[in-house]
Amino acid sequence: MNKKLLVVGTMAYDAIETPYQKVDRVLGGAATYIALSSSKFPLHCGLVSVIGEDFLDSDLDKLTQLGVDAQGVEKVKEGKTFFWSGRYHDDMNTRTTLDTQLNVLENFTPVVPDEFRDSSVVMVGNLHPIVQLDALSQMDLSHSFRILDTMNFWMEHFRSDLDQVIAQVDLISINDEEARLLTGEFSLTKAAKKIHAMGPRYVIIKKGEHGAQLYGDDKVFIAPAYPVDQVVDPTGAGDSFAGGFAGYLAHSGEINFDTLKQALVVGTVFASFTVEAFGVEAIEKVTHTSLQNRITAYRKLTHFNWDEKILAL
Amino acid sequence: MNKKLLVVGTMAYDAIETPYQKVDRVLGGAATYIALSSSKFPLHCGLVSVIGEDFLDSDLDKLTQLGVDAQGVEKVKEGKTFFWSGRYHDDMNTRTTLDTQLNVLENFTPVVPDEFRDSSVVMVGNLHPIVQLDALSQMDLSHSFRILDTMNFWMEHFRSDLDQVIAQVDLISINDEEARLLTGEFSLTKAAKKIHAMGPRYVIIKKGEHGAQLYGDDKVFIAPAYPVDQVVDPTGAGDSFAGGFAGYLAHSGEINFDTLKQALVVGTVFASFTVEAFGVEAIEKVTHTSLQNRITAYRKLTHFNWDEKILAL
């Protein structure tokens, strides 16, 4: 496996309101969070996205200075960057979208740079299924482990397009409500089985503050969320999860249930960092040491000693 | 530590409705589930409870045949057994109580048999705080690890009595909503800290299908629920959890954060058995082998390999 990761997804400006704070316009977008997280690993990360003329050079620099290859980021003349605005409720788990301005995203045609067509991992972020199909069609699929993110909107309105994408990927990462919507099954174990039958060998079901589950190879792995004292801003938690997950996987050089479990833990830890500050602030500050320490702490949180003698009744 | 466990709590008849099934009158009650679960371990379990004349000998036999000592179960002449009726909603996580008839529970005065006053573990189930205090006052507290269950009703209406009980116990086991209600803290880690300050060295916060958390000795342990394909009836899941937990603890002969973690896993596994059938049906059928197998499976579900070299970036 080469250590190349291709990320396809949105770059955006976000306005975010929480019960405690409000910001008008901060750097956001799924691909931004994914690339920032995965760039913590020594790999070659290529970004395919679209921005408007209003996108600040200093914001693009944040990514390129970390080694992210931005040749696949199209800057549309006189275009405006995708804008999202939302308000989090008191429980910090649910939110209301106040405004979505697609802007340059409306006519986005992804172009995968030649050198990333054989990336060992491709992470296709939440986008119109037709755009996702377009991106995947440019990959040398025999080389790439394909990871898909999507959301309820596409399930409800573009189901047949979405089904085509799902059939082509190795792993799909969605939340519990989306898994239920996609399959009509309330039980997540049953939902995962149905999704396997649609194509993906591996299924990740995210449950927000309750953690995430990985299904595949007739195995299950369940990872609780890392508990943080204070959630400051949940924006980007899922995307940082995806970025840490994909980054670790591309870095590890091997894809099997064991490395996928480790990747899920890394993603969980990235998500926990993200929610501790506004926007991309916390994820930018993650270091090798802080990552290592939190993974060690996470292991202590979830592991217990057991041997069969204990129950020699 | 002697291997004596004292259980104080309700015995009842339940009428249960789920989206799939309905039963009119089945054996229930917290103490019933707790005793049935803990009786899977080789220990001396004493039960303190109250029943009416309508309580079937065959139901009491279910417990005594498993070695449960029922001398502390008072049978009230012409009295009627506590009755509860509830309906589970489609998500199987929420329920509506349709009827509660306290009956003999209204004038329950617990009497702890002499031989159980020095039990190494005492599990005080959800009851009026005054009754809980009465039971605790009969224990030789220097010998006993005291575990408390309670619920939102007592927090809302008998807070000062409840605070007295909480101050006396070593461990409290409540759900996430109750922890928030008790402390006014939304964050569970913050809530746990406040509860420690109220007395209990250890705090368990149950999150239903999302698992449970253990706090104490400046450590945290997080255990996801064991995923079952089909939840048939959630009644008694929390009480079987408590019974498996307390039973394992009394059996293990040692109380520290490591054995408490193991006890939490055992409790989690007991809860998963309980929800797979109606009422006490599944918990009655648990064998040493099925327990051992599910704990082994649970370990695989939650453990991952990790060493620092993996992130030698």
Image (cartoon, coloured by chain):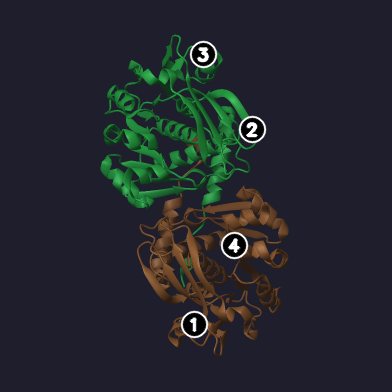
Chain colours: A brown, B green
Kind of element beneath mark 3: loop
Please name the amino acid that badge 2 sits on.
Answer: Gln
The quarter of the image holding the N terminus of chain A is bottom right
Residue ranking furthest to the top? B77
Kind of element beneath mark 2: loop
The reply, left or right, for residue A277 in relation to residue A73 is: left
Circle 1 marks a residue in which chain? A
Within 10 angstroms of label 4, few (less than 14), some, or many (20 or more) residues?
many
In the rendering, at what x and y percent does residue B152 appear?
39, 38
Q: Which mark is residue B21?
A: 2
Q: Is residue B235 above or below residue B118?
A: below
Front residue of B223 and B297: B223
Circle 2 marks a residue in which chain? B
Kind of element beneath mark 4: strand
Q: Identify residue for label 4.
A: A173
Q: Which mark is residue B81?
A: none
Do the residues at pointers 2 and 3 share their chain? yes
Q: Identify residue for label 1.
A: A67
Lower position in the chain sequence, tag 2 or tag 3? 2
Q: Given contact means CB atoms under 8 Å apart, are the residues at marks 3 and 1 in contact?
A: no
* Image quadrant in which you'd find residue B196: top left
Mark in front: 3 vs 1: 3
Q: Which mark is residue B54?
A: 3
